[in-house]
Image: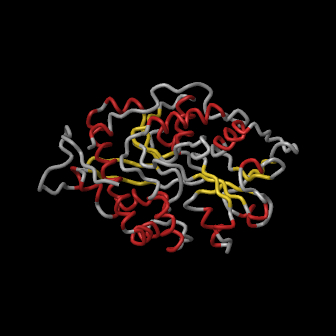
Amino acid sequence: MKSLRIMALAGAFLIAGTPLQAQDLYPVTFQLKWVNQGQFAGYLVAKDKGFYEDEGLNVTINPGGPDIAPEQVIAGGGADVITTWMAAGLAARERGVPLVNIAQPFATTALEFVCSQESGIQSSADFPGKTLGVWFSGNEYPFYAWMAKLDLPTDGSPEGVEVLRQAFSADPLLQGQADCISVMRYNEYKQVLDAGIPPESLTLFNYADEGVGMLEDGLYVLEDRLNDAAFVDAMAAFVVASMRGWEYARDNPEEAAQIVLNNDMSGALMLDSQTYQVIEAAALVGNSPALDIDAYEQTVATLLSAVSAENPAITVEPEGAYSSVVTDKIE
């Protein structure tokens, strides 16, 4: 990850050698996709270390949760910018919420598929007749696109696979209820390892490697806000500070994990698991926050080909769903 800086900004968010007073800072409300955890360490670090203030911003970070949809929050005026998966962003756009991707810090996917040694699965050719744990609520699209690509029915027939609606934990694999389960590389996969299962005994599939990758945590704003030059400058400053936060988290994972714990509203997070999560999440961040168009097109293709999904994310090719106007200001 390389250092970034803002090119000339209209509105002068940065005043060389002049500390900005709180009332001079541009206010930004940022809505997370989920609760405060290592997945969002770069943003929490940027807030804690004063990186946003360095860029002339007063940033409020609102955690998400199971009953919070960032797309609805921003549509209702509760946030200026959100982080969400592209599937959710594109689905919201098709349904009338004019979300636009302005930056893509997570360049690769962390959603993976892990199979137990007992399953006997070594490749996707071994899937027929197996029970596969799948997350829904928008996480099922790459799975169904993958099954369609493999020409495997998902109806539980002997020539196809049985789909188990999986909760957001590794329990179905650990308890022998499924041969394979969905995991996030920075979260549930660690739960499997913590259960004492050696990684060499597992078969791990990455959706991107299977040609059905789907971009995850990106930054989204409402389309009409991009007509405001001051807002665009603020978002460029926000992206720069956030990437600086991710760089710091990558280089100082235990300190970053402690910052996450300091922002943990549940009191349930542990330092070792969050340090692991910070390391894995930071590894997903690319050298540039600019959206990779090839990865965008693969995401769109994945969503359009997820024909077995009960609630398709999108039904037509999206238009105007991303803009480089923010990242063009960053070098």
* Quadrant in the picture for the N terminus: bottom left
The way the protein has been coloured in the rendering is secondary structure
Point out residue 263 in the picture as x, y percentages from the top left corner: 45, 65
Instruction: Work out whether residue 74 or residue 323 is closer to the camera in this orientation and state it.
Output: 323
Instruction: Work out whether residue 78 or residue 294 is closer to the camera in this orientation and state it.
Output: 294
From what the image shows, is residue 267 above or below residue 229? below
Q: Say which residue appears at 77% left-offset and 40% top-offset.
A: 152
Q: Say which residue appears at 36% left-offset and 50% top-offset.
A: 287
From what the image shows, is residue 191 above or below residue 39? below
From what the image shows, is residue 151 above or below residue 13? above
Number of numbered labels in the structure image: 0
Instruction: Work out whether residue 14 or residue 154 is closer to the camera in this orientation and state it.
Output: 154
Point out residue 135 in the picture as x, y percentages from the top left corner: 68, 50
Horizontal arrangement in the rendering, residue 176 relative to residue 43 (left or right):
right
Horizontal arrangement in the rendering, residue 323 relative to residue 197 (left or right):
left
Instruction: Work out whether residue 311 or residue 180 is closer to the camera in this orientation and state it.
Output: 180
Point out residue 158 in the picture as x, y percentages from the top left corner: 88, 45
* Quadrant in the picture for the C terminus: top left
Report the residue that reaches farthest toward the right. Answer: 158
From what the image shows, is residue 308 above or below residue 48? above
Q: Say which residue appears at 68% left-offset and 59% top-offset.
A: 203
Q: Say which residue appears at 59% left-offset and 41% top-offset.
A: 211
